[in-house]
């Protein structure tokens, strides 16, 4: 393998890896606050791409993306208020079934609105044939946009949870929901906010990646599987570990095409998920005592 080809695969792996990490962080935000594994997380990414494409017909690109993020955050809040808030001590299985049902519902609504056509936002800089030469490899500027925006999302979330009052209130709910409630924190509002936050970052990632990966009504299912695999691989609830796990999965997929045909790329994620569940269910970076699912 030449150095140029290695760099090409490396950037492809980093790009997809950080997208998987953003989806996994969405899983972790909701899981940490509520104990819910939200299998509709991939649909938030799809909505971000589809809504921004529709809005871009009427507004400049930055406004279209901002509008898509806000609308998807409202969808996230609506999902929580409509399907989650009214439940009293539901079982884990019931919650999983509900989020899968919500995922199917959002997908069918998207099919009704946008149809089966594949869509994409225009490239943020240049077009599909514009490239930048890095160490001999030719990389699309949109790839650098994806890596840059997703990296900023990860850093901003880390600062949000560490230094802002809302972030610390969400961490308090994650650590001990009862104690947080006794301290005057509204756990219900934190749950709603966690859905809005995970929907917003998913929508932003969906809009930024749209020019390269394209988007359609059912793209969320595959992303949810990859994001869930990364969340499990890193250790459920650990967002920084999800970044490392996402990059690992992305690089494995990118370099796998040198060994197996491209059609088998998705098998790698499923194989890793099964191996982690059987061999190390608390993930590569998770603690065994934190591996058990939380009570809602």
Image (tube, grey):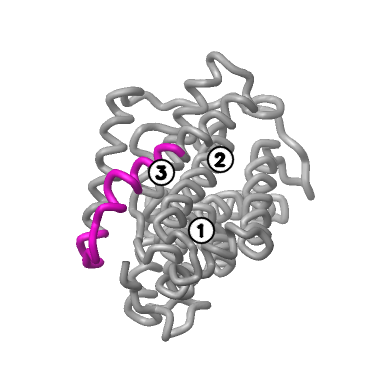
Residue 5 vs 62, above or below: the answer is below
Residue labelled with disc 3: 77
CA separation in Å, label 2 and label 1: 13 Å
Q: Disc 2 or 1, which lies upstream in sequence?
A: 1
On screen, residue 96 versus residue 139, left or right, reads: left
Q: Give the image location of residue 233, x and y in percent.
A: 45, 70
Q: Residues within 10 Å of mark 1 (few under 14, many from 20)?
A: many
Q: Residues within 10 Å of mark 2 (few under 14, many from 20)?
A: many
Image mark for residue 204? 2
Q: Nearer the viewer, residue 163 or 66?
A: 163
Does the magenta segment cover residue 113?
A: no
- Residue plotted at (68% across, 40% down): 145
- Residue plotted at (39% across, 52% down): 224
Work out which residue is located at the far top of the displayed protein and give it. 58
Q: Give the image location of residue 257, x and y in percent.
A: 49, 54
- Tell us which disc is closer to us: 3 or 1: 3
Q: Residues within 10 Å of mark 3 (few under 14, many from 20)?
A: many
Residue 252 vs 141, above or below: the answer is below
Q: Disc 2 or 3, which lies upstream in sequence?
A: 3
- Tell us which disc is closer to us: 2 or 3: 3
Residue labelled with disc 1: 25
Q: Do the numbered discs 3 and 1 sit on residues whose CB atoms are within 8 Å?
A: no
Q: Nearer the viewer, residue 194 or 273?
A: 194
- Residue plotted at (34% across, 44% down): 79
Mark 2: which secondary structure?
Answer: helix
Mark 3: which secondary structure?
Answer: helix
Q: Disc 3 or 1, which lies upstream in sequence?
A: 1
Hey, which quadrant is residue 75 in on the image?
A: top left
- Residue plotted at (66% across, 54% down): 156
Image: magenta residue range: 74-95
């Amino acid at each position: 393998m030449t150095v140029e080809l290695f760099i090409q695969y490396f950037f492809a792996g980093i790009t997809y890896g950080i997208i998987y990490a953003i989806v996994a962080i969405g899983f972790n935000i909701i899981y940490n606050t509520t104990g819910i594994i939200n299998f509709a997380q991939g649909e938030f990414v799809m909505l971000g791409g589809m809504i921004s494409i529709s809005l871009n017909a009427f507004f400049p690109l930055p406004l279209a993306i901002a509008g898509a993020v806000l609308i998807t955050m409202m969808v996230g809040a609506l999902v929580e208020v409509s399907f989650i808030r009214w439940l009293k001590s539901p079982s884990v299985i019931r919650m999983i079934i509900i989020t899968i049902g919500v995922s199917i519902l959002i997908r069918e609504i998207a099919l009704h609105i946008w149809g089966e056509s594949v869509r994409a936002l225009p490239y943020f800089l240049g077009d599909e044939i514009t490239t930048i030469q890095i160490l001999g490899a030719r990389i699309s500027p949109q790839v650098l946009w994806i890596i840059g925006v997703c990296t900023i999302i990860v850093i901003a979330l880390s600062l949000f949870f560490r230094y802002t009052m809302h972030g610390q209130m969400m961490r308090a709910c994650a650590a001990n929901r009862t104690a947080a409630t006794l301290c005057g924190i509204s756990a219900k509002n934190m749950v709603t906010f966690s859905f809005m936050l995970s929907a917003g970052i998913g929508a932003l990632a969906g809009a930024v990646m749209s020019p390269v990966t394209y988007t359609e009504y059912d793209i969320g299912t595959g992303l949810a599987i990859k994001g869930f695999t990364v969340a499990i691989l890193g250790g459920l609830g650990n967002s920084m570990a999800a970044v490392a796990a996402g990059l690992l999965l992305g690089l494995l997929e990118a370099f796998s095409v040198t060994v197996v045909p491209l059609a088998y790329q998705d098998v790698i994620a499923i194989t890793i998920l099964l191996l982690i569940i059987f061999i190390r269910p608390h993930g590569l970076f998770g603690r065994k005592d934190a591996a058990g699912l939380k009570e809602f």
